[in-house]
Amino acid sequence: MRRRDLSFLVAGSAAVVFTACGGPSPTPPSSAAPMPSTTSAEAAAPAEPSTSSPALAGKTVVIDPGHNGRNAANPSIINKPVPDGRGGTKACNTTGTATNAGYSEHEFTWDVATRVRQALTARGLKVVMTREDDNGVGPCVDERAKIGNRAKADAVVSIHADGSNSATARGFHIIYSAPPLNAAQREPAAKLAGTVRDTLRAKGFPVSNYIGKDGLHGRPDIAGMNHSTVPAVLVECGNMRHPEDAAQLSSAAGRARYASAIIDGILRYLG
């Protein structure tokens, strides 16, 4: 998402639940400190997680695909101010960004989110999506956070991509709420951020060279995380304006790799 588009999560949209069938940037907290080729078949198939644990039983994950397909056609809705969680307001939502070739962020986030949902559901996790398809509007950033709160989620992961116009800016970063407003935004969110950062790096994705530190970025202005009372992070998977990042974000193989890394991060955090 572009920096002006960094609102996280548009009112009035119901959460969608999936369960298995039958069987200036503050310094990141120490708990989020660093820790130490895809085939066409893999690109078409859902990403497979590499970890599992009995501790996953009964866990709930909220996956938030950033933006929505009809946001741009509904400016009166998405420009409506909503509480930002720190006494101010933000726009309900934004349109998101796109690659120079026209591949949109909302398409990317929906594709990756559905891959993540399928794999986590197959592992027996309860998965709640903040939007049911890529043909709607919103929901607003504050409502997306409330979806996670109502679900009593063990982890909330919002999926995005950035849109910096800097010619050299590339790489992913993980955003978390800072300074924290509650206990969930302290150690739990920091741990979730660090774990997802580590699994993205393990898949070979470069950390951001233009924002944050070591792939982590604490911010006070992300409404969806400010409102969250459960561990929540936002993954900026790469810069859609950089040619190398755009190639990964636009390809099915690249999206499968992003999904696999996010799945691994969630499972390792929960397990």
Image (tube, grey):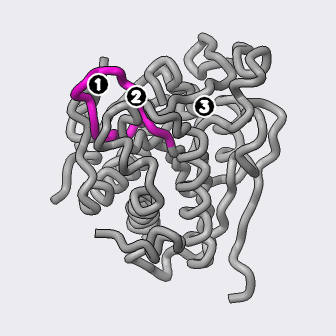
Quadrant of the frame with the C terminus:
bottom left
Residue type, numbered disc 3: His
Q: Is residue 23 above or below residue 20?
A: below
In the picture as drawn, the residue positioned furthest to the bottom comes out as: 23
Q: Is residue 269 visible?
A: no
Task: Verify whether residue 66 appears in magenta.
Answer: no
Task: State which tag comes first along the sequence, 3 or 1.
Answer: 1
**Label 3 belongs to which residue?**
227
Task: Give how far apart the Cα atoms at labels 3 and 1 are.
Answer: 19 Å
Q: Is residue 13 above or below residue 119?
A: above
Task: Verify whether residue 164 appears in magenta.
Answer: yes
Are there few (<14), some (14-19), or many (20+) residues within 10 Å of tag 1?
some
**Label 2 belongs to which residue?**
178
In the picture as drawn, the residue positioned furthest to the front comes out as: 101
- Image x and y of residue 24, in percent: 31, 17
Task: State which tag comes first along the sequence, 3 or 2.
Answer: 2
Q: Is residue 4 above or below residue 157?
A: above
Instruction: Provide the secondary structure element on which disc 3 rests.
Output: loop
- Image x and y of residue 9, in percent: 62, 34
* Residue at (56, 57) in percent of width and height: 154
Q: Is residue 257 left or right of residue 184?
A: left
Task: Give how far apart the Cα atoms at labels 1 and 2 are.
Answer: 7 Å
Instruction: Provide the secondary structure element on which disc 2 rests.
Output: loop
The magenta stretch is 160-175
Residue type, numbered disc 2: Ala
Viewer-proximal residue, 32 or 247?
Answer: 247
